[in-house]
Structures are given as structure tokens and as C-alpha cells.
Image: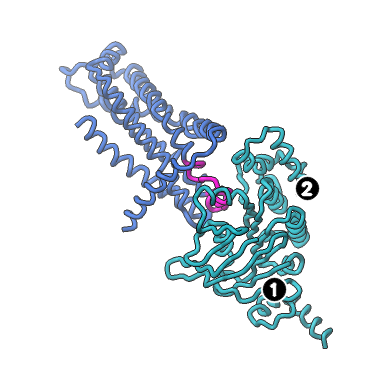
Chain colours: A cyan, B blue
Amino acid sequence: MIEVENIHKSFGDNHVLKGISTVFEKGKTNLIIGQSGSGKTVFIKCLLGLFEPDEGQICYNGQYYSKLSTKERRNLRQEMGMVFQGSALFDSMTVEGNVMFPLDMFTNQSQSEKQDRVDFVLKRVNLIDAHKRYPAEISGGMQKRVAIARAIVMNPKYLFCDEPNSGLDPKTAILIDNLIQEITQEYDITTVINTHDMNSVMEIGEKIIFLKNGFKEWEGTNKEIFKTDNKAVTDFVYSSELFKKVRQMYIEERN
Amino acid sequence: MKYLEAIGKYFIMIWEVFKKPTKWRIMKTLILKEIDELIFGAMGIIIFISFFIGGVVTIQTALNLNNPLLPKSLIGFATRQSVILEFAPTFTSIIMAGKVGSYITSSIGTMRVTEQIDALEVMGINSLNYLVFPKIVATMLYPFAVAISMFVGILGGWVAAVFGGFAPSGDFIQGLQMDFDSYHVTYAFIKSIVFAFVIATVPSYHGFYMTGGALEVGKASTTSFVWTSVVIIIMNYVLTQLLLG
């Protein structure tokens, strides 16, 4: 579980995060949504420890990040997995090399133990046949799955995903969403996903927070988001024609 | 003010490079890979340039020594001094700043724009140690490349002198051996170690702290070449004053 208490973050005069408080629960897929420039990426980077909040606290399973020593922070980071928007796979390594990388860096396992673990996670993301290929030789969807495999290979307690299905076709996007949700439930991970994708919100949004201009505008579930009267949320959710029609049908059904 | 800030940031980066080292088992592989890329990968261009520069120095010296009272051995002497003191360590370093420096900036810069550096940081890895330290260690073998450059440069001079008809082989070799001071070679190696450190770290700084996209990677490579060359030329002056002055 991650508890966020009133965090603020500024870059010069630009006050990006303005007192956000929330709780991301364990075993659930928590989604951060909002328009571009609303502070989602800065927020997730604060959660990852890449940015230090100017004010406020972030607490990981009872451990306040700001009170941890450098070594404790390093250890905490090893409990985090991250799926970047562009996958961020190491170009010079094969799929297998990318997934094995955290094991090489942080464990003293034998080569066969590491190989078994890599094979296991690659099977889990249905990529065992691509293990000898380089990132440039596989599709965007496969790259995302490799990034997920790399993020979970160390059995993380926290999984962060920055727009995991951007640039993917709708079918692959759903596949990635479902994979993240399955992994979250299977390994009881606290998962936080930064997304624009309303399909993801509908499919896997067990908890959603909506950011606007650096404030937390709304918080709820994927069922509640379609019933809310918050104008900022409805403007965002029903910006596409498809969702406008869905809302129309919902209102007609209710009446 | 901007430059002062950049200089401060550069020295903080150097400090960070030596903190929290990566596992030796991994680092060993990275160092060997960088030696292959940065030293052996650059040998072809170093040999090619050194040979022809040596030849050109010889021809120019010979053409300027048209007084019949001056012995032909001076051509060999001038070639040796020019190649050992300046051309092998400094000229080669400027070439290396272009070839190796651009490679370092673009490879680290690409890792920055594709979030690979963020991925390392999120895993709890000291990305500066992981990326820059192996390059510093690899470039410490640069005096080896400079020694080869010296040999090939002098060889190029001998070929130009003998086959160009500027000096007989015996005179040229006599000039090479005339008043030889081994400290000049030491001076050249000390310079080349300092230049190697500059070639590894200045381009790394420009790649690591770049922002933007693919276009900015190209711009950072150009900027890094300019600044690496400027630093090498300033350090060349300072070291010459300190070691020979």
C-alpha cells in the first residue's frame, strides 16, 4: 500500500503538484488519469523517488520515503518495477538480457536459477519464443510485454506503469491491460498506472484518481466515474464521440 | 553564470561516478566492451591519420630546411619532436574527441531520451557509475594508442623522407636518435591520460544531462565535440607550462 500525504512539487515558478493526498491499495490496479500537463508524470516520478516532493510525504507499507537512509531508499527501489511509456528496454541486450538484467545486478543467484526465473516470467507474458531477439526486432506490444517481464522479474511489491498501452492497437492494448491486472492480483502487488486511455479505465480501473492542474479533482472506481457529475471529469471522460453516446444511452436507460 | 553552473554540475557528476559502484562481475564486462569500442575501435583512424601527419611534418620540415649548411638529420629530429610532443598526444586527442566523444554523447543521450537512464535509476542503480565509469577506465588505455600513433607517425615521416627523396634513411634515423630526452615521452603520456579523462567525461556530461528528443541528441554531440576540443586545448597549454615550462 502507498499512502500519499499532501504532496507539492514545483519546478521554478511552475507549481505542478498542489497538495495531492490519496491511498493506492495493495492487490489493486490504481489509475491516475487527467489531461496532458495535469501533473500525472511528475506525480508518478515522485512515487518512484525520481523526484523529491517539496512538501508532503509518501509512505510505502509504513515506511516514509523522506525518512529513509540512502541505502534504505536503494533497497526500496529494488522492490519497485516500472514499465515506461516507451518501454525503455536496453537496445544492446536481447529480450532475455533485458529481463535478466535486474537479477544480474541485485542477486547472487546461479546462472541456472536466473535462467529459470527469466524463462518463467517470459512464459508468463507469452514471450518465451522471442528470448534471443533484440528490442528493435520485436513489435511495440512485445516490447511492452518484455518491459512488464523485466519489471516483475524481481517479485516487486510495487508496479508503476506510465501509459503502458500508448501507441498500441486496441486489441494489444486490452491484452496489456489484462496482463497487468492479472499480475497485480496474482502477486498481490500495489500497481499504479498513469494513463489517458478510457478503455483502460473501463477495463481495469479498480481505483481512479483524476488530476487537473496539479490538484486531485476526483477519486473513485471505474463504475463511479460514469455516474459522477463532476464537470471536469465528465468533460475528460466524454471527450470522445463514442463515450458521449455511451453516456446518452446510460441517461436514457436511467430515465 | 550558466557556464559556472555547468562546470559545477560537471564536477558533481565526476563525484557521483565514483560513488556506489556496480558489481565488479558486471563492471568487468562493461569495461572490456568499452575498451573494444573506444580504444580498439579508434585504432584504424589513429593509425591512418598519424601516418600521413608524420609524412606531412617531414615534407614541410624538409622544404623549410633549404640551407645546405643544415644537416639532413634535422628533418628526422624535427619530425620526432613534433610527433612525440604535439601531434601524437594532442592532434590525435582532437580526432578522438570527434570520433569517440560523439559516440559517447549520442549513446548516452539516446539512453536519456528513450528513458533507459530512468529505468536504471528506478532499479536503484547508480546510472553514472554504470555508464561513465567503464568509459573512464577504458580511456586510461589511451596512452597505448598514443604510443602507436607516435610510432606510426615517425614511420610515416621516414617513408615520406626516404621515398620522397627529402633525406637518406641513415640521416633521418640519425636525426631521430639525436638528443633524445625520454621525459618528452613521459610528458606526452601524462598529457594523453589527462586528455583521455576529458574525452570520457565531457561527452558523457553532455549526453547524460541533455533534454529533448532525437534532434537534441545531434546538437549535444556537436556541442560536446566543441567543448571537449576547447578543454583539451586549454589543458594542453596548462600541462605544457607545468611540465616543460
Density class for disc 2 (Cα within 10 Å; few <14, some 14-19, many ≥20) is some
**Magenta residues, dominant SS class:** helix
Task: Report the front residue among A177 and B41.
Answer: A177
Per the image, label 2 sits on a secondary structure element best described as: loop
Per the image, label 1 sits on a secondary structure element best described as: strand
Residue drawn 36% across the image and 36% down it: B195
Q: Which residue of the protein is positioned furthest toward the bottom in this rendering?
A: A255
Check if residue B113 falls in the magenta segment. Answer: yes
- Residue located beneath label 1 in the image: A220
- The three-letter amino acid code for the residue at tag 2 is Asn
Chain letter of the residue carrying label 2: A
Which of disc 1 and disc 2 is earlier in sequence? 2
Q: Nearer the viewer, mark 2 or mark 1?
A: 1
Q: Is residue A29 left or right of residue B182?
A: right
Magenta stretch in the rendered image: B110-132
Task: Report the front residue among B160 and B220.
Answer: B220
Residue A167 in view, yes or no: no
Check if residue B114 falls in the magenta segment. Answer: yes
Q: Measured from the top left, where is residue B245 in percent x and y?
A: 19, 32
Q: Which residue of the protein is positioned furthest toward the left in this rendering?
A: B69
Residue A120 in view, yes or no: yes
Circle number at residue A126: 2
Q: Measured from the top left, where is residue A255 in percent x and y?
A: 83, 88
Q: Is residue B19 left or right of residue A252?
A: left
- The three-letter amino acid code for the residue at tag 1 is Gly
Q: Measured from the top left, where is residue A131 in percent x and y?
A: 72, 40
